[in-house]
Amino acid sequence: MTQLAVGFDFDHTLGRDNHLERRAFGVLAAQLGTPIDHEAENEKLIIERLLVPFRGAELSMAGMLEKFVTTLPPRAASCGLSGAELEERYRDACFALIDEHVEAFPGARACIDELVSSGIPVGILTNGWSPLQERKIARALGAFPGPVLVSETIGAYKPSANAFAQLERALGCAASDLWYVGDNPVNDIDGAHAYGVRAIWMDAYGGSYPTHLSPPVATITKLSDLPTVIRGS
């Protein structure tokens, strides 16, 4: 009998952190004596331009934070903190924000419980850094009943084939029997399809799927619909 398995992205699929990493930049700036409004459009743009290459492993955390300090007033730029010291402060700021800002998507726990009770193994493959992602997942979902793969730990980032291959091995199924649920059309859906995994787009925010990418095999707007889609396969 074919053993189906389901892999999930975490952020904006099973849970959300309400811009925790961006908020942590604001905490760091305040510690350096140069408070910023992390919701201001210019600050959001600066921070996102730093987070994107960091999340894609093109920029180290220390390098990201050193660049961030150069965008602040001179008194912060001359703070004398090394990249490692900035990194320690940023990590601590992120961890301190978890309890207040991380939450599960509606129906996430019930969806996971239903799949597991039906004998379908589940796992998480998420881009990000450890242990932030693991702590976010634990806060939102409690004890997750399957493998949790974080890109920094496994040394592979979605949409790479290596990332999905490691999820396949962790769940002990063939790629053709693996479903992957995520919100990012490039990293999650196109990446999964390229590896031969059936991808489901989690469209929780009413988005528009890019027409130049391979389409998902299904689209859901709420997690309670996922078990029905899987069983209908």
Image: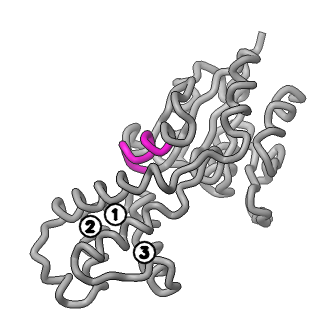
- Residue at coordinates 72% horizontally, 17% vertically from top-left? 117
What amino acid is found at the position of numbered circle 2 in the picture? Gly
Gap in angstroms between the C-alphas marked 2 and 1: 6 Å
Label of residue 59 in the image = 1
What amino acid is found at the position of numbered circle 3 in the picture? Ile
- Residue at coordinates 68% horizontally, 39% vertically from top-left? 108
Q: Which residue is mark 3?
A: 47
Gap in angstroms between the C-alphas marked 3 and 2: 13 Å
Label of residue 63 in the image = 2
Q: Which residues are magenta?
A: 128-136
**Callout 2: few (<14), some (14-19), or many (20+) C-alpha neighbours within 10 Å?**
some
- Residue at coordinates 44% horizontally, 82% vertically from top-left? 43
Gap in angstroms between the C-alphas marked 1 and 3: 13 Å
Residue 196 appears in the picture as rendered: no
In the rendered image of this protein, does residue 57 appear above or below residue 22? above
Nearest to N terminus: mark 3 or mark 2: 3
Residue extending farthest top: 1
- Magenta-drawn stretch contains 142: no
Decide if residue 16 is on the left or right side of residue 202. Answer: left
Closer to us: 100 or 150: 100
Quadrant in which the C terminus is drawn: top right
What amino acid is found at the position of numbered circle 1 in the picture? Leu
Residue 128 in picture, x, y percent from top left: 44, 50
Label of residue 194 in the image = none
Decide if residue 195 is on the left or right side of residue 21. Answer: right
- Residue at coordinates 57% horizontally, 36% vertically from top-left? 141
SS under mark 1: loop
Closer to us: 197 or 35: 35
